[in-house]
Every structure is written in structure tokens, then in C-alpha cells.
Image: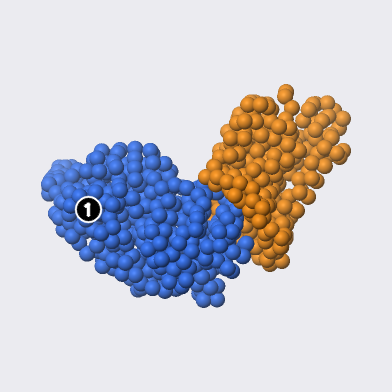
Amino acid sequence: MKRNLIIAVAIMLLAASGAWAQAKGKISGGVVKIGVLDDMSGLYSDIGGQGDVVAAQMAVDEFGGKVLGAPIQVVSADHQNKPDVGATKAREWYDGGVNVIVGMVNSGVTLAVTKVANEKHRLVIDSGAGSTRLTNEDCNPYTVHYEYDTYSTGTTTAKPMVAAGGKTWFFITADYAFGKSLQADTSRFVEKEGGKVLGSVLAPLNASDFSSFLLQAQASGAKVIGLANAGGDTINSVKAASEFGITKKQKLAALLIFITDVHSLGLNAAQGLYAATGFYWDHDNDSRKWSKEFAAKMNGKMPTMVQAGTYSSTLHYLKAIQAAGTDDPDAVMKQLKSMTLNDATVKGGKIRPDGRMVHEFYLYQVKTPSESKGPWDLYKLVATVPPDQAFQPLSESRCPMITKK
Amino acid sequence: MTEIFGVPVAALFGQLVLGLVNGCFYAMLSLGLAIIFGMLNIINFSHGALYMMGAVFTWFALTTWNISWWWCLLLVPLAVGIFGIGVERLLLRRLYKVDPLYGLLLTFGLALVIEGLFRYKYGVSGLPYGIPEVFQGALNLGFMFLPKYRAIVVAATLVVCFSTWFIIERTQLGAYLRAGTENPPLVQSFGINVPAMITLTYAIGVGLAGLAGVLAAPTLQVSPLMGSNLIIVVFAVVVIGGMGSILGSIVTGLGLGLIEGLTKVFYSQASNTVVFVIMALVLLVRPAGLFGREK
């Protein structure tokens, strides 16, 4: 009996080490580690946060938990919206065998992490941070910017407003990398379309009262007030604008607004706003099915485009390893850039040489309370924007990898 | 139109009024802090969390039990006050004999726990709460349209602040309170229940935070993080006004709201740091604060 047991254990060990040896040749360290680095408890934690971890795990489960015979593991950490914390964690993770960092949110942190990735020759696929600097001035061969950026949401939102006669703009801008990038990208577009920017005011991040900035915007007489901010700042701006009756004469353009923001504002305050997004849960059958699965794991909360992007980027990262037959970062990146990305959340996506992932983008409008049939039934589709119009064209690129060619 | 430094006077007035509205929140929160510090010698770091609690309770009462904003004005401060009584009886009471730093650490930890629980339950994006129907619309002040609701906030704050100051400085009960903190054994020997009075003071102090939360719910984002965004500024207000000074906290709260409003017009990037610059300057000249007494 005892001898049998020993033999059985020996056989199992042999079998396991066989599998190990088989995977080892292709997968460094015998395991593929996906690191979700995110704001887990701060102001962006509803946009990414724990939802990003769930989304990444959903991609791993869909893949069967193994790639090229090696197990896939999801690890996560809180970057606390601090660039130094994020960079230190990334360094520790890459040295400890993490293959790719996904999720992110917060442009400041992401810019710091992509520098580490470049130095360590490891991959980062960001679907949370918005700044277009990631694929322009600060681009590198190891960074993919997934899902959206400030150019795509800014211009997609601005387009119908400029077309409808909103030619003069005033910006209320969050005073850091992301807000400035959002304002710059949108201004360039407005001016190109023959519009004019009358002025702007820089609001400190997390300023709880926005009425004073809105009054300045009102005094400017601009037809459109562009909100170059995100999360709680956008919510407080929209709330104050409706309270002060500013929306009666001037139009409000929330240049980046997430479904969680609209849900939190309520339809009374948010109705009529345009929302540009790369993903909305109620888009088609695939997105509905995936989102309901996600919501079941997240206390009923529907996914944001960031969380959808984290799912999609994780899934395609794994597919790229499978297709490349190795987890070597350069080989996987080459594979990623040659693939067409298709899943429940993305249709016909491509990753360009500058690291920008481009795909179909959507312009939605927030429903009125009477149009909405449920707590998350918030948007109606206005327009579908093809990838080449939604994202900054390569010809305008400020990325050294592109301009030096 | 007349202009001051390139800004039309009318616009400047508008900004001052808005500054006053924000100053009201500062005043009401710092008033609660001043009472608690003055009477209990506790630096109540959980004040911001209790303010947030007040706002979330207001939302909860409306969505779950359909209790209107009017009733919340009364019920929510009461609920937060009762919570405060629990905290004082069970936790704070044990710390009166030790250094005030322990009270600070305890209340800071408490704030993190409360915020963490609410964040776990509701996330950070916030909860929708509209303006009560009676107050929708705006008043024409000539130089600006002031939403009726904001005017009500100013009026309510002035009433509450003045009554609190009056009770503590001008009534019998206030005299007992002040005497009780000065020399507890003596006052107790006159047959006055000092521990109960201290509990009550703490409850009133945090009740004011709850009330500020009710007032904030319709205009600001109701979110578990709303307290921590505000509390640091409020502490600066208390320090500038002079720790424990009731009149000081009211006047400083309103005054700093005005200054912050002006900063938003002339150099908006500095609007969240101007309070701290003033704090540093005041501490250099008057270490006990503008209205504080050197001990």
C-alpha cells in the first residue's frame, strides 16, 4: 500500500515536471503572470479598480486558465494614484516575473510605469489612462494604449457640437497631465473645424465646488463649455451647471465621461449630455452577455470602457502568446501589432506601430428619465465613428518611433 | 462696466457670493470641531467622515424610505449624533486622561474605517441626489443668478452658527459646559452630571457635521470620499481661527470661503492651496490663531 503510494507520487511528480519542462522552453518561469496595477481605493477606483481585476480574470478563465501548457496567474496592486508608488511596484513586478501590466488609470502614474517597462523590456497595456502623450512624445516599443485616449473622447464629443454651431469654446480643465492633454487635443480639433477657444480655467484636482469656474465660463459667453476633467470633478461640474441654469443658454461638453459618472449623476442632471466611449454594455448581444456576466461578479455594476478594455487587452495578450509560441516580450508585441482584435467588447481593433490601439468608437447621448428602462439603461447611440476618424492619425504623430522613419 | 484688475465688478460679486456659500460649509464643520476641541480637548479627525455619513444617510433615507430632505434636516443630525454618543461612550471616554494625540489617532483611524466601509458598499462615484423641488430655480441679485438652494444654505448656516454660539456663550447650559471642562470635579460636586454633558457636547459637535452633510447632499457629489476632500481645509480653518474658539471658527470659515472665491478668479490653480498659505502666515504672526488665547 505504502509502496504504491510512493510510486504514485513519483509518477505524479514526473508528469508534472514533464509538463513543466514542456512549458519552460516557451514560457519564462513556467507561469504567465498578469499584473493589474490600478487605483484600488481612490477617486478612479470605480472606473478601473477591482473591476479591472475581475475583468482580467474573466479573460484568463475564458482562455481556460492555461497558455502553451503554463498556468496563468492574475496579481493586483494599488498604485494609489502616485507615480512613484506605481513605478516601484512595476519594477518589483517585472523583476519578480510579471509578464504584462494591464489596467492602470491615471495618466501621471501610467507615464511613469511605461518608462520602467521600456527600461526592463517588458510590456504594459494601458486601458485606463487617457493622455495622448503615451503614444506621442512618450511612446515606446513596449507600451500599448488600449481602448481610448483624450483625442478620441474629446474630438468625438466635440464634433457634433461644433457641427451644430457650437463654434466658441471655454474649457474647465483639471490641473494635471490628463486635463491639459484633453484640452489640447480638443482645442486643436475645434480650431481645425473653424471654431475658436475663448479661454480656459485650470481647476485643482478634487475641487469640490465648481460653480465659480462655471460662472467664469458663463461670463466668457462661449457657446460650449468643455469639461476637460474626469470622475468626481466632472460629476460636480455637471451638477453645478444644472443648478445654476447654465445649460439653458450654453452647451456642456463632458469630454471624458464614464458610465459610472452618469449613473452617479442621475438622469435628471445628466440627460442630453454626449458621451464618447469605446464600449457600452448595451451595444450588441455579445457586449450584453459579457457585461451581465461581469455585473454578476461586481455587485450589479455594469463595466466601464476601462474595464472592458482590461478584459480585451488581457485576452489578446494571451492569444498573442499562443500564436507567437513564446512569452518573449518582443515576439508577443510583434504578434499583437499584426493581429486583428475581436471579442465581446471590441470589433476589428488594430494596434498601430506607435502602440495606439484603434477601433470603432461610439458617440452616445444620455437618455431622459422617461426613456430609461432600468438603473443602467443610460445611453442611446447617436453615431458610430470609424477608427481612422476616432483616433489621431499617424500623420499627426509626435512619436519619435514614427517621425524618425 | 467698472473693472477691478480686469475682472468686471459684477462677476467679482458673483464669485464672492459663491465663496460665501462654500465658507458656510467650512464654518459649520469647523464650528463642530471647535466645540469638540474646546470642551473635550479631542482633535476629531473623523469629522469629515461624519459629514460624509450625513450626506449618505440623506440619500439613503430618500431612496429607501422616501424621507424628504426636510425631515433629514432633523433626523440625520440626530442619527449622526447618536452614532457620536456611541463613539464617545465606548472609545473616546478612555482617552481623556492621556495625551490628545491618542484621540487624534483614534478618530483618524475611525475615519478610515467609516470611509472604507462606505466605499466598499457604495463605490466612489457617488450617489445621485437632486435639489428639493421648492428650491429649484434662482434668485436674481442683479449681478448674478443665485440658485435659491444656495441662498438657503447661507441662511441655515448663519442661524445654526449663531444659535450654537449663543447657547455656549450666553446661556446657563453653556456656562455649565464651560465650567465643566475647566474644572470637572468642582462642577460635579455641585451636582451636575459632567460626563453626560461631555457626551452631549460631542453629540452636538458631530451632529453639526451631519447637518452640513445634509446641506451638501443636493449640491455636491455624495460620495464616500467627499469628507476627506474637505476635512484638511476645515482643519486649516480651525487652526487659523484659533483651536477651540467658537466665534473664531465661524468668522474664519466664512472669511476663507471669500478669499478662496477670489483666488478662483485671479489665479485658480492656487485656489486649493491659498488656505494653507494663509495658515502658515497666521501661525508665524499669531501662533494661537486669530481668535485663540495663548495658554
Residue furthest to the bottom in view is A371
Give the x, y percent position of residue A183.
43, 55
Q: Nearer the viewer, residue A374 or B236?
A: B236
**Disc 1, SS:** helix
Q: Nearer the viewer, residue B115 or B20?
A: B20
> Are there few (<14), some (14-19), or many (20+) residues within 10 Å of tag 1?
some
Chain B image colour: orange
Residue drawn at x 35%, y 72% is A384
In the figure, A250 relative to A145: above or below?
Answer: below
Mark 1 — residue? A402
The chain displayed blue equals A
- Quarter of the image for the N terminus of chain A: give it: top left
The colour scheme used to paint the residues is by chain
The amino acid type found where label 1 is placed reads: Ile
Give the x, y percent position of residue A335.
17, 56
Give the x, y percent position of residue A386.
31, 69
Q: Nearer the viewer, residue B130 or A301?
A: B130
Residue drawn at x 49%, y 58% is A198
- Residue A278 visible (yes or no): yes
Q: Is residue A170 left or right of residue A13?
A: right
Give the x, y percent position of residue A375.
51, 68
- Residue A301 visible (yes or no): no
In the figure, B44 relative to B268: above or below?
Answer: above
Residue drawn at x 38%, y 59% is A188
